[in-house]
Image (cartoon, rainbow, N blue to C red):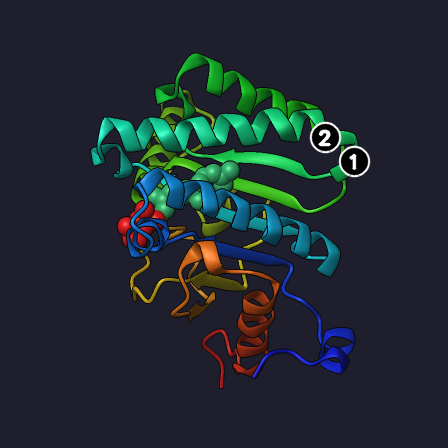
Amino acid sequence: MAISQTDKRTLPVPRHIAIIMDGNGRWAKKRGLPRTAGHAAGAEAFRRIANYCRTLGVEYLTVYAFSTENWKRSAEEVSGIMKLLGKYLEEALRDMEKNHVRFKFFGDLTRLEPKLRKLCMDAESRSAGYRGVQVNFCLNYGGRDELVRAAQAFARDVAEGKYSAEDLSEELLSGYLYSAGVPDPELIIRPSGELRTSNFLLWQSAYSEYVFMDVLWPDFGPEELDEAIAQYHRRNRRFGGV
Ligand code: FPP
């Protein structure tokens, strides 16, 4: 059952929704198309959902665009995904005034081609003042990698005398993550029928509600997002209480 028009007006939408955009390859295979065509359709699905999140008043949308493990794919597929990202960012930079989306990138961007890295940095700096939805692109991102980097950064601060080991708290550690300052996602959606979290937002997902759906990402649209939010509303979130 999808969210009804009445529910849409009365129930609060999650402040932060995260999505594992999965199933592009299978979508393409079913149609006899190259995998890159699936990613292109996936990029369109992302556009639709980012716009829809903005109209719903979702404050943060975090999407898994490329993981630290995705480099294992063929050079052709990797470069296809990077090209799509570059194209999307060029358009986003051009239409910035219209869309009011604020961009952030979670992940180690140093491994990206300099041109793409510059587009990411320009998108981040030029959109910093916008108050529409914040899109967090996870790019060369891994949840374990994020935690290792946070631990290294904290260890450096300890070595410099800024903190002692005992100062470390959940709050302090959160500040070393890519997501510093961003509230944890209430809802994490994984389409495509896979039932894994795949190294996505390991720390931030401690109390997130997961919704797994059978649809492939390129076919995911506003109706599917409504359905995921409706499932989220039916859950009873207790945060370890009774
Ligand atoms: C997972 O599907 C998807 C990815 C690894 C890449 C996600 C990238 C995009 C949606 C395009 C990026 C561009 C923008 C602008 C957001 P899969 O390839 O693992 O699918 P499969 O499991 O069916 O093979």
Q: Secondary structure at mark 1?
A: helix
Residue beneath label 1, please?
98
Q: Where is residue 205 shown, x and y percent of the image?
A: 43, 59
- Amino acid under label 2? Asp
Residue beneath label 2, please?
95
Q: Residue 143's image quarter?
A: top left
126 sits to left or right of 9: left
Q: Is residue 85 above or below residue 202?
A: above
Q: Going 52% across and 64% down the picture, which residue do you hit?
A: 187
81 sits to left or right of 54: left
Q: Residue 206's image quarter?
A: bottom left
- Amino acid under label 1? Lys
Q: Nearer the viewer, residue 195 or 73?
A: 73
Q: Going 34% across and 50% down the picture, which residue do you hit?
A: 28
Q: Where is residue 193 shown, x and y percent of the image?
A: 33, 67
Q: Going 79% across and 36% down the picture, which residue do you hit?
A: 98
159 sits to left or right of 100: left
Q: Which of the labelled discs sits on residue 25, or is there none?
A: none
Q: Are marks 1 and 2 in contact (CB under 8 Å)?
A: yes
Q: Where is residue 110 shown, x and y percent of the image?
A: 39, 19
Q: Quadrant of ligand 1?
A: top left
